[in-house]
Amino acid sequence: MSKTATRKGKDARTKLLDAALRVIRTKGYSATTVDDLCREAGVTKGAFFHHFKSKDDLAVAAADYWSQTTGAFFEEAPFHKHADPLDRVLAYLAFRKAIVAGTVPEFTCLVGTMVQEVYETSPAIREACNRSITGHAATLVGDISEAAAARGVVLPQGPEGLALHTQTVIQGGFVLAKAGNDPQIAVDSIEHLIRYVELLFGVTQGGNDNE
């Protein structure tokens, strides 16, 4: 889909947020300028400052926008269709592996990218990024908790700890994929994570539990 097509019918604020998702994941937050965002969005600097006080102000809004757009994407994903909660968890991880596609900026995470650069210098952006990452992790807690209860598995750090661990591995895989300029590194990391979860829940090669 062309940029012209994706911009059609959107207001300047939404165009700028969409531009932020693309440009920051490609260039990084510090290297991205207001001019870059305006050029990508096809709007004027006047329009930018009408909607945002600063680049940092846009970044906070972009983190929340990222949560909304990716949240909707994951809500519609097929892994929710599984009846068994552990199957849903494993299917979620398989889905995360499957969507590691295209160039590194296309599959990596906006908030993970930003927080690495500004965690010390911009508390507002850091908090917005943390809210996004932990908010996504929280969507996994229910299925993890149900799976543990159904199989009598005691999770050392609880369902919340395992949910956060999945994001730690995925985000870490993205960092290493950037460092190596190789998406396969992220894929391999998620495959290791899948095996870890299977072992934690007693999944064997011939079945999905330890019964």
Image: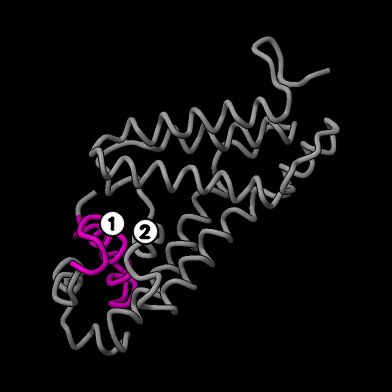
Residue pictured at 81% horizontal, 34% vertical: 153
Instruction: Residue 88: name its quadrant.
Output: top right
**Mainly helix, strand or loop, the magenta region?**
helix
The amino acid pointed to by label 2 is Leu
The percent coordinates of residue 33 (x first, y second) are 17, 73
Q: Is residue 33 above or below residue 72?
A: below
The percent coordinates of residue 93 (x first, y second) are 54, 35
The percent coordinates of residue 54 (x first, y second) are 28, 85
How dense is the environment of label 2, judged by Cα within 10 Å: few (below 14), some, or many (20 and up)?
A: many
Q: Nearest the camera: 173 or 91? A: 173
- Mark 2 — residue? 110
Q: Which mark is residue 52?
A: none
How dense is the environment of label 1, judged by Cα within 10 Å: few (below 14), some, or many (20 and up)?
A: many
The stretch of residues the image draws in magenta is 3-31
Q: Quadrant of the C terminus?
A: top right
Instruction: Residue 80: name its quadrant.
Output: top right
Q: Is residue 198 above or below residue 163?
A: above
Horizontal side of 193 relative to 207 (left or right) equals left
Residue pictured at 39% horizontal, 64% vertical: 115
The amino acid pointed to by label 1 is Arg
Q: Nearest the camera: 71 or 15? A: 71
Q: Is residue 159 above or below residue 135?
A: above
The percent coordinates of residue 161 (x first, y second) are 66, 50
Q: Are marks 2 and 1 in contact (CB under 8 Å)?
A: yes
Per the image, label 1 sits on a secondary structure element best described as: helix
- Mark 1 — residue? 25
Nearer-N-terminus badge (2/1):
1
Q: Nearest the camera: 16 or 100? A: 100
